Image (cartoon, grey):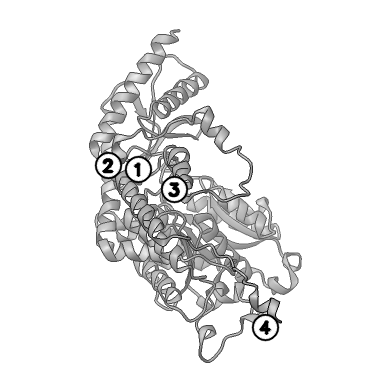
Amino acid sequence: MDSLQETTVMDETLDPPDWANMQALSHRIVDDAIGYLRDVRDRPVWREMPAEVWAFFDAPMPREPAPIADVYGDVARNVMAYPMGNIHPRFWSWYMGSSNFTGALGDFLAAIQGSNLGGGNHAAGLMDSQVVNWCKEMVGFPAPAGGTLVSGGSMANIIGLTVARNAKAGVDVRERGVGAIPKPLRFYASDQVHSCHRKAMEALGLGNRALRRISTDANLRIDVDALRTAIKEDRAAGFKPACVIGTVGTVNTGAIDDLQALATLAAEEDLWFHIDGCIGALIAIAPQNRSLVAGIEQAHSIALDPHKWLHAPFEAGCALVRDASAHRNTFAVTPEYLESMPRGLASGQWLHDYGLQTSRGFRALKIWMALKEHGVEKFGRLIDQNIAQAGYLAELIQAEPALELTAATTINIVCFRHRLDGASEERLKAFNTEIMLRLQEEGIAALSDTTVRGRHCLRVAITNHRTRREDLDLLVRETLRVGKEIAVAAPG
């Protein structure tokens, strides 16, 4: 007994051994972070990592501790210095949000609090539900509707389409599986639909063939007459038409399907009406352009992305479902270890009942803080600003004989290419791809490329609250300069 009393056991912890030193380093990190965003315009959009950085990430697993100041030094040199670039005002590749400092503080505070948003009676859960309610209000959904925050648009679409599958299956899919569905289900979308919907069909056990791609009109919107014909053909062939997916902002060109026509057709044909609004649903809050998404409020489910036009730091998506009971019944499971209590910690709502994750991060805080700081009306004006900037860029391109638009500019995506007299489509693709790569490598601008109806083009997606019109002037000048350099270097 005496020996036990004399033995001192030192329990370990991950807390800093010296809080004062950690506080000083934390202040330095915040100062660096402010400078990082304040001066972002002065840095290249993107730059290639040198060999020593690649080698750094081949280092063996650490087994012994290192001073935290050294750890931060490694991050500053090898990570912060070589970003993807999407916070830069001249990053227009793919379709990215550009984050904001307040949202970053929200992410930090959420990590400090450390709450698991699977559910329970605590403030973070209430904030999560409040942000979902704000998203409903933004797109005109009724207050009793269901909804959940998720990682991003792909998962938000999977949530909505899972509810659609279960609602239209005709059997208890959760209990019996997709093999018990009496007639194969058919989902419909335009031939411009995002690839995440194929993944959804595969994950839902329906297969890629369950998603029928419908041809588009001259404006790259789903052809409603062709859709009606496809539904009739599928019924005659023994399939069960279940869901039509309307796209609010296609990833290629930003085209917006005729939502009111789709809502009418869905009602007539008894289809679930899902809207992929990850690009454009939030145009509903933009005062000058909200009419472009008229009809969005008639959907049965909507996927949207706060990490795009609400500029939340990654990740933040949102799935909304008009029928809250159908939403919950698709995912809810109540094991004995997660039963609700009349009071105490387990007396709150179990938010994991509305999606696939039991453990859920505190995504709401970064959205909530930025919305409270700026107000939703400012975010709406920023959407209008981006759309106006895309229109301005389209005008610059149309005024320049060496450039051409390759698709109509509907919202904030501009598709164009540099002309090359007498060149084949294959050579035009190589020429414009080289322009894109040189603009990236020189740190001037980050563009992506795509192919629309057989024509390769460069693609500028303006989803950045830091972009100015002078950046678009620069893009046109530099595109012409680089194009001339390439043409001179490789004549004929």
**Residue 163 appears anywhere in the view:** yes
Say which residue appears at 60% left-offset and 65% top-offset.
162
In the image, taking residue 383 as reference, residue 199 lies left or right, namely right
Secondary structure of residue under mark 4? helix
> Mark 1 or mark 3, which is nearer to you?
3
Q: Which residue is mark 3?
A: 69
Percent x, y for residue 304?
Answer: 44, 59
Sequence-first tag of 2 and 3 = 3
Q: Which residue is mark 2?
A: 389
Mark 3: give few (<14), some (14-19) or many (20+) Cα within 10 Å: some
User: Which residue is at the front of the view, 407 or 284?
Assistant: 284
Image quadrant where residue 447 sits: top left
Mark pair 1, 3: CA separation: 37 Å
Mark pair 4, 2: CA separation: 55 Å
Sequence-first tag of 4 and 2 = 4
Sequence-first tag of 1 and 2 = 2
Secondary structure of residue under mark 3? helix
Mark pair 1, 2: CA separation: 8 Å
User: Which disc number belongs to residue 336?
Assistant: 4
User: Which disc number belongs to residue 462?
Assistant: 1
Dot 1 and dot 2 residues touching (CB under 8 Å): yes
Dot 2 and dot 3 residues touching (CB under 8 Å): no
Dot 3 and dot 4 residues touching (CB under 8 Å): no
Amino acid type, callout 1: Ile
User: Which residue is at the front of the view, 20 or 81?
Assistant: 20
Amino acid type, callout 4: Glu
